[in-house]
Amino acid sequence: GAGVSQTPSNKVTEKGKYVELRCDPISGHTALYWYRQSLGQGPEFLIYFQGTGAADDSGLPNDRFFAVRPEGSVSTLKIQRTERGDSAVYLCASSLKGLAVTSTDTQYFGPGTRLTVL
Amino acid sequence: AQSVTQPDIHITVSEGASLELRCNYSYGATPYLFWYVQSPGQGLQLLLKYFSGDTLVQGIKGFEAEFKRSQSSFNLRKPSVHWSDAAEYFCAVGTLGTGTASKLTFGTGTRLQVTL
């Protein structure tokens, strides 16, 4: 596809449940990022992958959140024991190589997954 | 730590009027600066970016931004606003994180309303 895609577009779950959010980056992009955007706020960094490895997970709020990218392409953000405070739009972005590798690197964002925890 | 401040939460302009959205950043090294636009239900779209060189940057949809190191600012401008420009605008600074990691730090956004 031409851009970053994310599924599902909307996810409603109950408190305590487990959810998975999927991101398909732009083909050929080695860097992948997850951000979280709460209502009325700008996106906040969660985690960054360079290839298959998580190069920086300093933005993950706690150990209920983790993400994988096993083949260096598709990534899944997983949230265990969801809480109402997890409700937000989860954004995925990809870039060709990552800012540390290419100083002119640019991140392209997907449409996001809106997560609502009841 | 890096930070981005967008002092205007909400701005209203008339169609055809000029626009300037303010952005101030805090970062110890050379900043990589971006402006993104987000329409309702849409993802973030890159308007323009600054990495180095000419401090006046041209972007899509007739937008431009000027990097002023002395003021730590990267304000977005458009000479004549169109009703379709109504959206949320985010300024961001790109920084190097852990190891070879890189990430964007965003401001809280400015919501632009355009009156006809």
Image: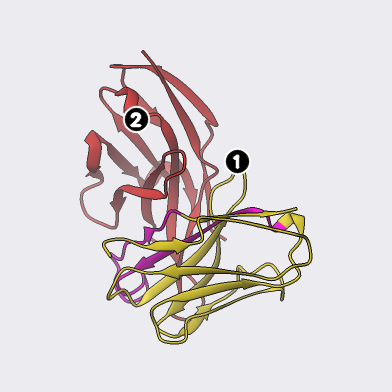
Chain colours: A yellow, B red
Q: Residues within 10 Å of mark 2 (few under 14, many from 20)?
A: some
**For mark 1, what is the residue?**
A40
Q: Is residue A16 magenta?
A: no
Quarter of the picture holding the N terminus of chain A: bottom left
Residue type, label 1: Gly
| Residue in the picture at 37% in, 51% down | B34
| Residue in the picture at 26% in, 62% down | A2
Q: Which percent across, then down, holds residue A27?
A: 28, 73
In this rendering, the answer to whether A8 lies above or below B5 is: below
Q: Which mark is residue A4?
A: none
For the magenta stretch, what is the residue range?
A: A86-111
Q: Residues within 10 Å of mark 1 (few under 14, many from 20)?
A: few
Q: Which percent across, then down, holds residue B91?
A: 43, 45
Horizontal side, residue B101 vs residue A41: left or right: left
Horizontal side, residue A95 vs residue B79: left or right: right
Q: Is residue A88 magenta?
A: yes
Task: Place residue A46 in its image quadrant.
Answer: bottom right
Decide which of A11, B51 is in the foreground and name it.
Answer: A11
Q: Chain of mark 2?
A: B
Q: Which percent across, then down, holds residue B64?
A: 26, 38
Q: Which mark is residue B85?
A: 2
Q: Chain of mark 1?
A: A
| Residue in the picture at 36% in, 13% down | B116
In this rendering, the answer to whether B113 lies above or below B110 is: above
Helix, strand, or loop for circle 1? loop
